[in-house]
Image (cartoon, rainbow, N blue to C red):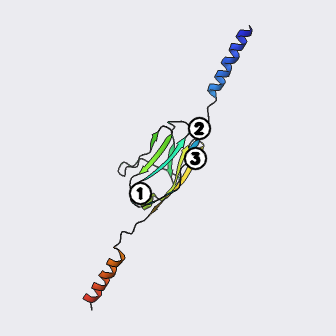
Amino acid sequence: MLVSICVNSVLMLLLMCALVETKITFTSPLKDQTVPEEQSVTLECELSKPDQKVQWLKNGKEIKPDRKRGILPKVEGTKHILTIPKALLDDTAEYTVKLKDQETKGKLTVEGTNHCCPQNLVFKFCLVSSVLFM
C-alpha cells in the first residue's frame, strides 16, 4: 500500500512537471544599428529555447519575405536573423521580434550617401558654364 502511494505520488509529480512549460525568454535582444546606405546589415536576437516561431515587424507592421531584395528571416537554433543585403533609406525603422507575449526592439538607421558629384567637380562645371555663357 505504501509503495503504491509513493509510486502514484512520483507519477503525479512527473506529470505536473511535464505540464509546467519553461518560460522562453530573449537571451540576447535586438540592438540599435546605424549603417551606410547600400551596405548589408544583419538584425539578430537569441531565445532561451531553439526553433521557436517568432514574428518580425518593421514599425509595427509584419515583415513579409522579399525574395527580390533578398530579405528573408531565418532561424539557426536559438538565433533569429533578418539580413538586409543592401540597406535603403526606407529601411530606417524600429524593428521588433515578437514571441507570444514578449518582444525585443531595435532601431535601424540607414545613413544616406551623397550620390551627387564631388564638390570640386560641381565648382569646375559652374566655372566652365559661366565662361561659356558670358
| Type of amino acid under label 2 | Ile
Residue, far left: 132
Residue, far top: 1
Where does the image place residue 102, in percent across and percent down from the top left?
59, 44
Mark seen at residue 24: 2
Residues 101 and 118: in front is 118
- Contact flag, marks 1 and 2 (Cβ < 8 Å): no
Q: How far apart are marks 3 and 1 (CA)?
A: 23 Å
Residue named by callout 3: 103
Residue named by callout 1: 87
Where does the image place residue 106, in percent across and percent down from the top left?
54, 53
Where does the image place residue 88, in percent across and percent down from the top left?
41, 59
Instruction: Count the labels in the image.
Output: 3
Image: 54 above or below 32: above
In the image, is 125 to the left or to the right of 14?
Answer: left
Residue, far right: 2
